[in-house]
């Protein structure tokens, strides 16, 4: 057995503290609700439509479930202390905690994951969902990504 040093224990304690912070616990619970709403939309519509259609319907479903969200949230880029509007937009920001990026593509590729990870860093958020509706079963199109 390898002994744990005081430094390792402090790091482990800090990691556990961050993972169970109230904000992260709320984001985690919200992610399950968002996925449930997305599954409901996919059950009704199936694959093959435009991303904008799924966005509209998912926002409707979130509203029906009483979940607060914002659509097409501008995401400025900070460069040398200046906030620049480079045209980035978060598809859906739920409760100001979870970033949801929607896709209706043949397959998720690494640049899609990089996009949401960048959005998480720029917005300083912990949890993001990448949801591709162009799949037969939605669970195959859901990716959960964390910042840090």
Image: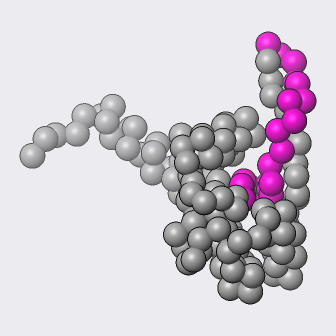
Asked if the magenta segment contains residue 83, the reply would be yes
Q: Residue furthest bottom?
A: 44
Q: Is residue 22 visible?
A: no
Residue 135 point in image, percent of width and height: 59, 71
Viewer-side residue, 100 vs 42 = 42
Report the magenta residues as a range. 80-102
Main SS, magenta region, reads: strand
Residue 61 point in image, percent of width and height: 82, 78
Residue at image x 75%, y 40%? 123
Q: Up-down: is 78 above or below 63? A: above
Residue 100 point in image, percent of width and height: 72, 57
Q: Quadrant of the C terminus?
A: top right
13 left or right of 70 in image: left
Q: Quadrant of residue 74?
A: top right
Viewer-side residue, 105 vs 59 = 105
Residue at image x 40%, y 38%? 11
Q: Is residue 52 visible?
A: yes
Residue 3 point in image, percent of width and height: 16, 40
Question: How many labels were placed on the picture?
Answer: 0
Asked if the magenta segment contains residue 115, the reply would be no
Residue at image x 88%, y 58%? 70
60 left or right of 120 in image: right
Q: Up-down: is 60 above or below 80? A: below
Viewer-side residue, 60 vs 93 = 60
């Amino acid at each position: 057995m390898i002994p744990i040093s005081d430094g390792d224990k402090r790091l482990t304690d800090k990691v556990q503290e961050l993972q169970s912070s109230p904000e992260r616990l709320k984001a985690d619970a919200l992610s399950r609700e968002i996925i449930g709403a997305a599954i409901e939309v996919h059950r009704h519509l199936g694959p093959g439509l435009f991303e904008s259609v799924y966005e509209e319907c998912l926002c409707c479903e979130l509203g029906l479930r009483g979940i607060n969200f914002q659509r097409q949230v501008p995401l400025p880029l900070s460069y040398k202390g200046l906030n620049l509007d480079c045209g980035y937009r978060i598809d859906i920001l739920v409760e100001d905690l979870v970033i949801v990026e929607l896709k209706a593509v043949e397959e998720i590729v690494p640049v899609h994951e990089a996009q949401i990870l960048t959005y998480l860093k720029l917005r300083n958020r912990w949890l993001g969902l990448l949801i591709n509706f162009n799949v037969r079963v939605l669970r195959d199109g859901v990716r959960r990504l964390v910042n840090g």
